[in-house]
Amino acid sequence: MAMGDCKKHHEIPISAGAALIALGVVYGDIGTSPMYVMKSIIAGNGGILHINDELILGSLSLIIWTLTLLTTVKYVLIAMQADNHGEGGIFALYSLIKKCGKYLIIPAMIGGAALLADSVLTPAVTVTTAIEGLRSVSLLHHLLGDGQSTIVFITLIIISILFMVQKAGTSIIGKAFGPFMSIWFLFLAIAGLYNIVGDISVFRALNPLRGIRVLTSPSNSVGIMILGSVFLATTGAEALYSDMGHVGKGNIYLSWPFVKICLILNYLGQGAWLLQNQGNQALMNIEDMNPFFQMLPTTMRMGAVILSTIAAIIASQALITGSFTLVSEATRLDLMPRMKITYPSQTKGQSYIPLVNGTLWVACIVVVLYFRSSARLESAYGLAITMTMLMTTVLLFVYLKQLKKKKVLPFIFLLFFGGLEGFFFLSSLSKFSKGGYVALLLAFVLLGIMIIWHQATAIERSQKLLLHIKDYIPMLEELKNDEKIPYITDNLVYIINEQKDDEIERDVLYSILNKNTKRAGTYWFVSLIVSDKPYEHEYTVDSFGTDYIFRVRITLGFKINQRVNVFIRQIVGDLMNTGELPPQNQKYSIYHNDTEIGTFRFCMLKKMLVPESDIVSWKRLIISLKYKIRKLAGSQIQWYGLESSSVITEYVPLFLKVKKAELLIRKQEK
């Protein structure tokens, strides 16, 4: 039996409107890179007095070909083909290939943790860089001075507003930001062209050999470590893949060429301006000199700061929406606890996770307060995302080899992109002591949560004891008709783990029969199965030949809100209509037209580790940590949307082997 039309077509069609939303949702991160990439390269080489044509053109060449190879070839042309029913990202990719080897969970966890860590740093670095652009306006520089306190204060206000509006839904935000982002990219292109006209020789940077030569050139004082700054030009590529499900693959194909041309024109414009101003003593006196703002006419800078601030907000948005998708997919894979997820809009892929939103918000504030300036934030930025890219390359290698059955291409792909990203990772490690350790610390904390949850869940599953429902039908029938036992509800619902046939965990039957014996009109054993198809919604029912015991399996796509109370009420109505369930006449009700469906009580069982459990220390520690994480993540009542329902919560012991207890010896009283 199906709940609605499960064959409904959910693919987002290609259109100008959807492509506009893609500009607002997907490209924010990579679209703000021009604000700080060349700034970081120049600062790393000692400032504008120490640069020359070879360094400028070589750096531009590296940027252009990094964008081409990593973003266009790897992600747009290859990775986006590895979609899971329209959804992208490292966990969606892992879902496709997880049957190819258990070890694949390791790169998936590392990549996912690193990308979530990057979601903290992106809002901090982009918004801070944009607000620092206020100093490029003479009047505002005079008011702000060289101190960072006002910059930090404004940054924190903007970041806070951004996280506060998330619950409105990224569809609304995308529609509002899409037009702004199209203006932003046009601005990037026009600003670039304005400066290119002054020195068209900058097009020499299109030669890839210049990029290769600059890596070992004496004009480049940091050598191969320059790649750590160059890599910042493509940090939004992984987010682009993760957000694919929000706007549709076709709309990214449609909009990416426009985005890439605008980015390259702006980088070339900065290069042309640097070629004309290398060695400029007046510019040397500007603290954190940023060619992105300095190349603009003075009259345009205030407008540029406003535009760049809006673009910085959009950059943050791309990572935040991507983090919601990542966490919901990690939950489905048993890598993270279940959390309350809402779907505030009807647009595909739009979700909101309050706990994730709040955690990212606090972490961003802490990071901004700790680093304070964009120069220091850039040192932390990029290191984590190189780890994600490397892990994605490993998973794509398996995808091409095992699923696509390619023979030579996967090895070429692995050697080329694995080697390229390996160089970027090694060069980014040079930033470790300057702030990169923060990115890695965040990634390792998130990775630790995933490992703990995954391992503890495996231990729990190894300890479960299964019984057959059919063996207990006579006892449940007797209980149902035993008027000596208080009648608690018409429908007693247990949400249980999926098992085959009529198997059910011992704890459930123990709860009904032994623990405060529960007499009800109908017993429901409901499993929620989350499928790889984002919008699947159907169910099956087994009544075991009765009209009071029902085993229900509800299959939901991982984008469907798990409102169990709504679904079970619909199923009850369906079974009454077919005659499989007798009417449940409710005598007292404010609903005059819906009195056949009776009352509901949901019983939620939670595992607990008892002191007597005979378990090795490291397993005890992992399970204990999982239960602490579970407590922080919220209750099952929130997960399943049962806040307004009648719920019984019971704790049951995790049935591990119990230590042999010492028997008491009775002594005679004197």
Image (cartoon, rainbow, N blue to C red):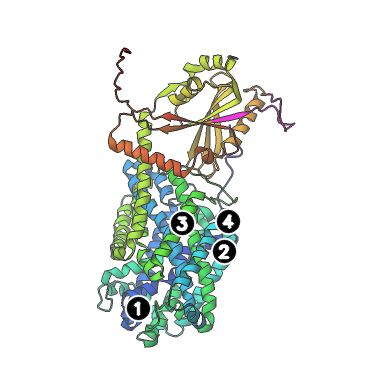
**Rendered image quadrant of residue 518:** top right
Q: CA distance from mark 1 to mark 4?
A: 40 Å
Q: Residue at x 72, y 33 (%)?
A: 591
**Nearer-N-terminus badge (3/1):** 1
Is residue 598 part of the magenta span, yes or no? yes
Task: Name the residue carrying label 2.
Answer: 178
**Horizontal arrangement in the rendering, residue 65 relative to residue 584 (left or right):** left
Depth check: give the residue in front, 492 or 94.
492
Q: CA distance from mark 2 to mark 4?
A: 10 Å
Q: CA distance from mark 3 to mark 4?
A: 24 Å
* Quadrant (top left/top right/bottom left/bottom right) for the N terminus: top right
Task: Name the residue carrying label 3.
Answer: 362
Q: Residue at x 31, y 14 (%)?
A: 666
Query: What stretch of residues is rendered in magenta?
Result: 585-602
Q: CA distance from mark 3 to mark 2?
A: 27 Å
| Mark 1 surroundings: few (<14), some (14-19) or many (≥20) residues within 10 A | many
| Circle on res. 171 | 4
